[in-house]
Each structure stands twice: as structure tokens, then as C-alpha cells.
Image (tube, rainbow, N blue to C red):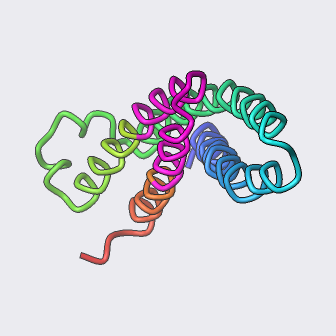
Amino acid sequence: MSTVYLVSVVVHVLAAMLWVGGMGIFALVVVPVARRTLGATEATLLLRGVGARFATVGWRVLSILLVTGVLNLHGRGLLPALATTQLWSSPFGRVLAAKLCVVGLVALSSLAHGRDARGAGRARASHLGRAVLMLSVAVVVLAVLLVRGTPW
């Protein structure tokens, strides 16, 4: 195992922790406290401000996840295999395909969430935020299956 691969895996895991953990803290701590302790206008301003800052951090984190994800595939010697049906028909390949699809849904949902959060679609933004969090948890589950193996 190379040092570059090990560092890439650690950075990937830390970035995923920041992404999912940040959304969890926002949804489970910041939003309820803001709504319970602040007036509607103040809560909205706080949530928009925190959300905007998290969006800035979040897109950087997603970029780091993309780069380290490619490095991790390279470190495992899998980049050439991406062009083969043998990889995609294996249990690992099917889980990787599912993970990449869900990551795509996370990115698209995050774009829509950001657009709605900046506009007047607060209710839809709230639903999309929850969807992004749940999809992100699914990515973590799929990542665990990639490294620990699938039960099927």
C-alpha cells in the first residue's frame, strides 16, 4: 500500500465525515435550535447564512471527494478495469455503479437545493436538504460495502 493511496483514503474519509456530519448537525441541531429560540425572520437569516457557508464548504468537499475517489481507484489498480464489463458485472462493480449513481443524485439534488434555498422555495429546499442527507448516508453505506464486501 503506497503512502499516497493511504493519505488519499484518509482525506476521502475525512471529507465524507465533514459532508455528512455537517448536514446532520445542520438538520438535527442548528435548524431546531434556530426555529425554537429565534423569531421567524432571525431564524431564516441564520439558516440562510449557515446554509450558504456550508454550500461553499460543501462544494469544495465534494470536489475533494471526487479527486480522492479517483486516486483511491487508481491506488487499488482499478482505473484500467473501469473500461471492462468484467468489473461492472462483479459484485464490487455493481456496488461501485450504484455508489456513482447515488453520488450523481447527491450532486444534482444539492444544486436544486441550493437554488431553492436562495429563492422563495423554502419548503422544497427543506425537503431537498433532507433528501441530500439521506442520499449521502446511502453513499456511505455503499462505500462500506465496497471495502468490506457485499453480502450477496
- The quarter in which the C terminus is drawn is bottom left
Residue 131 inside the magenta-drawn segment: yes
Residue at 44 percent of width and 40 percent of height = 106
Task: Give the vertical position of 114 relative to 91 (above or below).
Answer: above
Task: Give the vertical position of 59 relative to 130 (above or below).
Answer: above
Q: Is residue 65 left or right of residue 10?
A: left
Give percent across and percent down for residue 120.
Answer: 55, 26
Task: Give the vertical position of 78 relative to 70 (above or below).
Answer: below
Give percent across and percent down for residue 98.
Answer: 29, 51
Residue at 81 percent of width and 35 percent of height = 46
Residue 125 inside the magenta-drawn segment: yes
The extreme bottom residue here reads 151
Closer to us: 127 or 106:
127
Residue at 15 percent of width and 39 percent of height = 84
Quarter of the figure with residue 56: top right
Q: Main secondary structure of the magenta part?
A: helix
Total marks placed: 0
Closer to us: 32 or 87:
32
Find the magenta span and give its range: 106-134
Closer to us: 65 or 22:
22
Q: Is residue 113 left or right of residue 36?
A: left
Give percent across and percent down for residue 23.
Answer: 65, 48
